[in-house]
Each structure stands twice: as structure tokens, then as C-alpha cells.
Image (cartoon, rainbow, N blue to C red):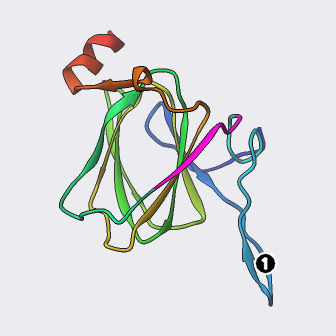
Amino acid sequence: MGKELMETTLRGSELLKLEEFGDERGSLIALEALKNVPFDIKRVFYIYNTNPDSPRGFHAMIDSYQVMVCVNGSVDVVLDNGTERQTFPLSSIHQGLFVDKMIWHEMHNFSEDCILMVLTNNPYTEEDNLIGYENYLEMIK
């Protein structure tokens, strides 16, 4: 699909390299469905103005994929596929973290200036969120 991986990661996730274009006028990074984002984008949202001591997430998406890009500041994203758990520090606009459906995710250590942009393949529905780690482990068995 034209995506370039930065490194091998936890099964169910990929760290994507986002290509920068620029000249003396400035720089640009484009996110394009089915090119450097491996799905058709249906929703984009930002997490910002967070409390550094208040982690977020703690759920899995049942039928949605995500790409997370830290467009400012930094955050640690913890992903868990039921057998492996890995922390991905995000602090560069040049990388996107692909999170497959049914991957547990948590966000920790938000910098005060963090802006985390998230692209998904589905509009939001409450039914798509799997809350509770024990519920998650039961569902993936």
C-alpha cells in the first residue's frame, strides 16, 4: 500500500515513516488514505490540553484501525495484543503508529504541549470500544 515501515513492532501494529516534502518556504507531510495510511480515513480527531498525570485510552477498538501521529510534544503509547505488550514513544511528526483493530491501547506521559492526532477507518460508535482489560482478554481468546 505504499507505506514504509520504520521498524518491526508488536504484532497488530506498525510504526510508519511519514515522508516530508519541503523547500525554503517550509515543510509539508501529507497523510493519504491507502497510500501512507493503510485504510480509508473516515474520522480524524486530536487529543490535546491533557493532564500529564492522567493516562488515557484503556480500551481496544473492535472494528476500527487507527494511525496515531504526535504532531506536537510527546506521548508514550502502550499497545498490547494479549500476548505481547510494547511501549512506543511518539515525539515526531515523521512517524505514525498504526494500531490494528482488537489491540489494547493506553496513552501515558503526555507532555504539556502534546497534540496527538488520530485517524480512523470508522466514525465513532460507543459499541466499537471494548472497555476493561479483562473483557479484552476474554474476547481475544
* Residue 8 placement, left or right of 50: right
Location of residue 137 by image quarter: top left
Residue stretch in magenta: 40-46
Mark 1 neighbour density, 10 Å: few (under 14) some (14–19) many (20 or more): few
Relative to residue 59, is residue 14 depicted above or below? below
Position of residue 46 in the picture relative to residue 126 (left or right): right
Q: Which residue is mark 1?
A: 22
Say what amino acid the circle numbered 1 marks.
Gly
Instruction: Write the residue at 48% across / 31% down.
Output: 12
Relative to 8, does residue 122 appear above or below in the rendering? Answer: above
61 sits to left or right of 43: left
**Is residue 124 placed above or below 91 in the rendered structure?**
above
Residue reaching furthest to the top: 141
Q: Secondary structure at mark 1?
A: strand
Q: Residue at x 19, y 20 (%)?
A: 134
Quarter location, residue 94: bottom right
The C terminus sits in image quarter: top left
As drawn, which residue projects farthest toward the bottom?
A: 24
- Image quarter (top left, top right, bottom left or bottom right) of the N terminus: top right
